[in-house]
Image: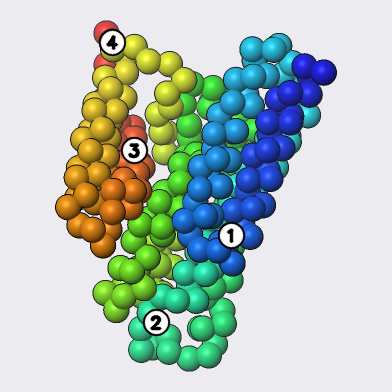
């Protein structure tokens, strides 16, 4: 029985991704984001349980990638699809052609997420860190951003062209060759940038909560969600900076 426990947890991740996709179309961003977060919780524990029980195998690896593709690829793409239907369009895109076409470009993110997961499975360089942006981080970024900033994203200050270009940037980040740090191990001597990131993230989250509490129209939770999106943006920036800085050889 114990050999099936990790796969059951992975299937819970997959189910969360399916529910998140449905919620993105019919119940709004908050519910969709909640199930993406729940899927990330199951994704964290399936690999841990497999190692703890000593039942790791190829079946679990493939199932995990399929589940991640749904939860962290299709679900955020569905959220973007609905946003494209509500975002403002610039004058040169103000035609039925763009109104019908642009929402479907959101599924480019699902395709790049699948490509990212396939590369991760065969890339021997990603045991201690990542090459390119992890799919859970990408999904949580978009979920947090759309949940907390829908009013701004659908205002005249933003538009479909900006959204499309911003989405393409993150599609590239998923498959780029930029090293990004992971938290699989932590030591002060070798991982000072990780500790710096954690400290800055705590400050950002605390600041988001304070801003949310002082703006009733936003609320504490939405302030925290904005902070989460900022933390993931900071993760990408710090990873890029760390990749170009000279390495300390001791």
**Element on which disc 2 rests:** loop
The span from disc 1 to disc 4 (Cα, nearest Å) is 44 Å
**Element on which disc 3 rests:** helix
The span from disc 3 to disc 4 (Cα, nearest Å) is 20 Å
Query: In the rendered image, which quarter contains the N terminus?
Result: top right
Outermost residue to the right? 1
Q: Which residue matches tag 4? A: 189
The span from disc 2 to disc 3 (Cα, nearest Å) is 30 Å
Residue 84, percent from left and from top:
48, 73
The span from disc 2 to disc 4 (Cα, nearest Å) is 50 Å
Q: Which residue matches tag 3? A: 235
The span from disc 1 to disc 2 (Cα, nearest Å) is 25 Å
Q: Which mark is residue 23?
A: 1
Residue 157, percent from left and from top:
26, 74
- Pointer 3 or 4: first along the chain: 4
Q: Is residue 86 above or below residue 49?
A: below
The span from disc 1 to disc 3 (Cα, nearest Å) is 28 Å
Q: Residue at x 64, y 53 (%)?
A: 19
Q: Is residue 100 above or below residue 231?
A: below
Residue 190, by quadrant, is top left
Q: Which residue matches tag 2? A: 89
- Pointer 1 or 3: first along the chain: 1
- Pointer 1 or 4: first along the chain: 1
**Element on which disc 4 rests:** loop
Residue 10, percent from left and from top:
68, 34
Q: Residue at x 59, y 66 (%)?
A: 25
177 or 78, nearer to the observer: 78
126 or 17, nearer to the observer: 17
- Pointer 1 or 2: first along the chain: 1
């Amino acid at each position: 029985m114990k050999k099936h426990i990790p796969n059951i947890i992975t299937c819970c991740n997959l189910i969360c991704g399916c529910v998140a996709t449905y919620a993105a179309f019919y119940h709004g961003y908050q519910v969709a984001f909640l199930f993406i977060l729940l899927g990330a919780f199951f994704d964290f524990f399936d690999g841990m349980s497999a190692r703890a029980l000593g039942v790791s195998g190829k079946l679990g690896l493939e199932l995990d990638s399929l589940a991640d593709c749904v939860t962290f690829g299709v679900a955020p793409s569905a959220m973007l699809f609905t946003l494209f239907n509500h975002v403002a369009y610039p004058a040169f895109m103000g035609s039925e052609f763009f109104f019908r076409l642009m929402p479907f470009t959101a599924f480019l993110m699902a395709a790049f997420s699948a490509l990212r997961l396939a590369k991760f499975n065969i890339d021997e360089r990603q045991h201690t860190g990542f090459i390119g942006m992890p799919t859970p981080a990408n999904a949580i970024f978009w979920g947090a951003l759309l949940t907390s900033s829908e009013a701004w994203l659908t205002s005249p200050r933003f538009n479909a062209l900006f959204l499309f270009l911003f989405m393409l940037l993150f599609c590239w980040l998923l498959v780029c060759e930029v090293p990004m740090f992971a938290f699989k191990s932590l030591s002060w001597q070798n991982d000072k940038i990780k500790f710096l990131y954690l400290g800055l993230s705590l400050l950002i989250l605390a600041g988001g909560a304070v801003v949310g509490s002082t703006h009733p129209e936003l609320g504490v939770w939405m302030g925290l969600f904005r902070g989460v999106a900022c933390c993931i943006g900071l993760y990408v920036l710090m990873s890029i900076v760390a990749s170009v800085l000279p390495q300390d050889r001791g």
